[in-house]
Amino acid sequence: MKKVLAIVTVLLFAFILTACDSDDGVITIGANIYTYNDNFMNGVVRPELERYAEEMGVELDMVDSEGDQAKLNDQVDVFITKEVDVLAINLVDPAAAKTIIEKAKEAGIPLILFNKEATEAGIMDTYDAVWYVGTDSAEAGIIQGEMMVADWQANTDWDLDGDGVLDYVLLKGEPGHPDAEARTIEAVKAFTDAGITVNELALTASPTWSTADANNTMEAWLSSGFGSEIELVICNNDGMAFGAVQAMTSAGVDLPVYGVDALAQALTMIGDDELNGTVLNDGVNQARATIDLAINAANGDDIVAGTDWVIDSATGTKAVRVSYVAVTKDNYSDFQ
């Protein structure tokens, strides 16, 4: 009997060692999405993070921060308690990066910020193991603006009152978000740079970037005193463009509308002549770059080793930037 127990004990110990060995070397990434209610982040970035993490053989612990920075702060504390190997954080408030960076630094855990870039100057330099994956915020606005300028110049009938002035409304998105701020500036600047006089009839910000808010706002604009003067609708993301189109359809109005993100629905709407253009915000490659950098950071390797990603050394921001692409009627099917 003692011999049997001894054999069982040895086998059990061997099983435990084997189980431990199977976990050894498996990187665990503590990650979040700032809110699952975001069309782009939840519909494009999150699924690719999950798919690509599985492909790369790493464990992804993903949570929804529900648009609450305080909740995200607590979630990071939980990840640290769990002793994750690396953090991949989609900030709720870009101005709150300092808090997250300090938590990661104190715990000695590498940190990849993605999609929302820290707004505080120099904050990325306070920790040697923090990097950013995202875009050049201004680039989307520049590309969208150039696309709109070309279409405005090619369609003289868009100038409804024939005064040579572009009368536009703009759905901005989250106030203070680097993308919302930069896109707003650059999209309009493209017109003035081209020598086109512009007149802003209305601009509104929506903290959720949401279709519902945009629908309500566009309905109010169309029924306002300047509703008949609107000649162009600029939207800083596709979700808001969807809401604008819904409101115009209900009102029996047909105006040029442009978005950003190149969501699947937006591509279909371009094909159906419901949306004039969008800009591909490459969430798939943002997700892949985030996982690739997280793996290298966890392993202590050069942050872009074995990848095609390039650090944006020109700006000194420790960032990998994924390029935007203009999407029009001519090429929308390439992205479907």
Image (tube, rainbow, N blue to C red):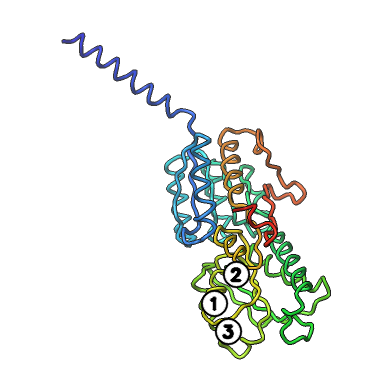
Residue 127: percent from left, percent from top: 62, 46
Q: Residue at x 50, y 54 (%)?
A: 33
User: Would residue 120 be found to the left or right of residue 162 on screen?
Assistant: left
Q: What kind of residue is marked 1?
A: Thr
Q: Which mark is residue 222?
A: 3
Q: What kind of residue is marked 2?
A: Glu
Q: Which mark is residue 249?
A: 1
| Helix, strand or loop under label 2 | loop
Residue 182 placement: quadrant: bottom right
Residue 178: percent from left, percent from top: 64, 62
Dot 2 or dot 3: first in sequence order is: 3
| Helix, strand or loop under label 3 | helix
Q: Which residue is mark 2?
A: 274
- Circles 1 and 2 in contact, beta carbons < 8 Å: yes
Residue 39: percent from left, percent from top: 51, 60
Q: How many residues crowd mark 3 within 10 Å: few (<14), some (14–19), many (20+)?
A: some
Residue 222 placement: quadrant: bottom right
Q: What kind of residue is marked 3?
A: Leu
Looking at the rendered structure, the number of numbered marks drawn on it comes to 3
